[in-house]
Image (cartoon, helix red, strand yellow):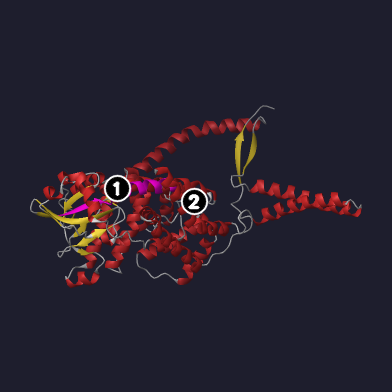
Amino acid sequence: MASLRAYWRFVVVCWRFLPLVWSYARDRRRFLLFGGRRRVSTERQRRRAERLVDNLLTLGPTFIKLGQLLSTRPDVLPPVYVEELTQLQDRVPPADWDDAREVLEDEVGPVGEAFEDFDTEAISGASLGQVYTATYEGERVAVKVRRPAIEALIEADLRAIQWLLPVLLFFVDDARAFSLRNVANEFSTTLRQEMDYSREATMLAEIRANFVDDPDVVIPEVYEERSGERVLTMRYVPGTKISDTAELERHDIDRHAVAESLERTYLQMIVTDGVFHADPHPGNLAVQDDGTIVFYDFGMSGRVDEEIQDHIVDFYVAVANQDIEAILDTLIDMGTLSPEADRATMAEVMELAIADARGEDVEQYRVQQIVSKVEDTMYEFPLRLPPNLALVLRVATVVEGVCLTLDPDFDFVSVATDYLGEQGYYERGARELITGTGDQLAASARSSLHLAPKLERALDRIDRDDFYVEAAVEDSTGSLDALAKRLVTGLLFGAGAVSTGLLYVAAADTAALVVGVGTLGVGLLCWRSFHRRRGGRAATGLAAGRGER
């Protein structure tokens, strides 16, 4: 039965997405198997993105979550799609109380015995669960209950997505295939984690412990005896939705201070603690009357290893110093930027991004210049996101958006710079630089001791005519191979054309037709090779060696 449901979902998903996949494939090759790229206007991309959002909403909870994940992946979709997907709201009507009650009582026992009072009207509904309020041990609590029978639907959808993935990979290049595989694996993992409320309770408790002495942050405590894999009971902490700026103004709350506190909190989670709340959209953040920030819903949460933390610090330090080369080097070290990327173009992109993040005015003509450069490589842009960075990017983008909602003039980079300075990361960087420089000087000194005798041996071989240089051509981009194919097909086409003409003159119509058709096919291959996009230039490397005559 489960397999049958998965097959049916696969058919439904294919039917929904086939027009979009077809359009995407034709954008890359006008006639699917050959032809140049089609230039797609921003307006057409926006219409397609809106259709994609509608399809995701129609397909239900799993695909709403998938859309939210894709909204954080600019390495998979063009910016217009990402912008539209960020508007996906994970809000659906709650399930019937009778069905939800079965799930609740399977986990914690009869409602009347587990709680002193229970309001059966859900205060919020989402694709995976819904939240009720109750009274437990004299305290008002929030009870999160997993949506009934959601497991079977999720598993069927995940299986359908796995079946669909090879079809999608057929239409994309290697770089985007890398990102799509990462998205599929990451999505499967995070969705199952989000359904496990016992994991959420563990992550919530760990993050709460890191901020227990911070007066600017409130994270509700968990009542473990009334929680389980499908139910999570927490202390109810009310507050004003963080994006409700009018209400915050009415309570005379300093919005800039709230924005700064929010960014510092996330910097501590990611850079210092290594465990973080990964779903900071306004529905999961509230502000109390004294300016304290309340965090809800830790279903999406993650960890950052020390290596990534170091790279993030290096990135922010480079941004603070506006050292573009250091920014690009850090992105390459993180695996986010391809080493073969056009550094000049990427440097211009980074300069504009930093200026925008600092709230500086950016000349429109510069933006248009960059866009025109990037447009032609929109589907092959050299940015990619390893799985361990995807959630971090999601947090950074969403938090910045929330901060700008609170304060349109908020300087995200400046606050990050101040935080890193206060935590001593710049001093650590200076110490590491000094240590690294000392190591390099010592290595250079050791190398210089070995250089003289090696140089003398090389000169002796030259004197004895026992030294030669071999040149090897590296053609990783296939440029020389393409040139050879063009020469061969060109020669064949020329010979075929002459042969066809001679056979026609000799009145050998059948032979002339056969040779002519073959010549036409070779001619099409030759024409196609000249209209392919050049992937790069051949590089020549030199290798030195010696041998006996």
Q: Does residue 143 show up magenta in the picture?
A: yes
Occupied quadrant, residue 135: bottom left
> In the drawing, what numbered circle is on residue 536?
none
Instruction: Please give the name of the residue rendered at 14% of the width and 64% of the height, measured from the top-left corner.
Output: 290
Amino acid under disc 2: Arg
The extreme top residue here reads: 548
Q: Tag 1's secondary structure? A: helix
Q: Is 269 placed above or below 251 here?
A: above
Instruction: Please give the name of the residue rendered at 34% of the width and 42% of the height, measured from the top-left corner.
Output: 435
Residue 320 in view in this figure: no
Q: Position of residue 491 (x, y in %)?
A: 77, 49
Residue named by callout 1: 195
Instruction: Please give the name of the residue rendered at 82% of the width and 52% of the height, measured from the top-left corner.
Output: 513
> In the drawing, what numbered circle is on residue 176?
2
Q: Position of residue 381 (x, y in %)?
A: 50, 55
Name the one closer to the observer, 339 or 155. Answer: 155
Q: Tag 2's secondary structure? A: helix
Q: Position of residue 457 (x, y in %)?
A: 57, 30
For the residues bearing labels 1 and 2, Cβ distance under 8 angstroms: no
Say left or right for 39 vs 520.
left
The extreme left residue here reads: 138
Q: Position of residue 304 (x, y in %)?
A: 31, 46
Occupied quadrant, residue 406: bottom left
Quadrant into which the N terminus falls: top left
Q: Is 307 placed above or below 132 here?
A: above
Amino acid under disc 1: Met
Mark 1 or 2, closer to the camera: 1
Name the one closer to the observer, 489 or 84. Answer: 84
Quadrant into which the C terminus falls: top right
Residues drawn in magenta: 141-161
**Crowd class of label 1 (few under 14; some 14 to 19; many from 20; radius 10 Å):** many
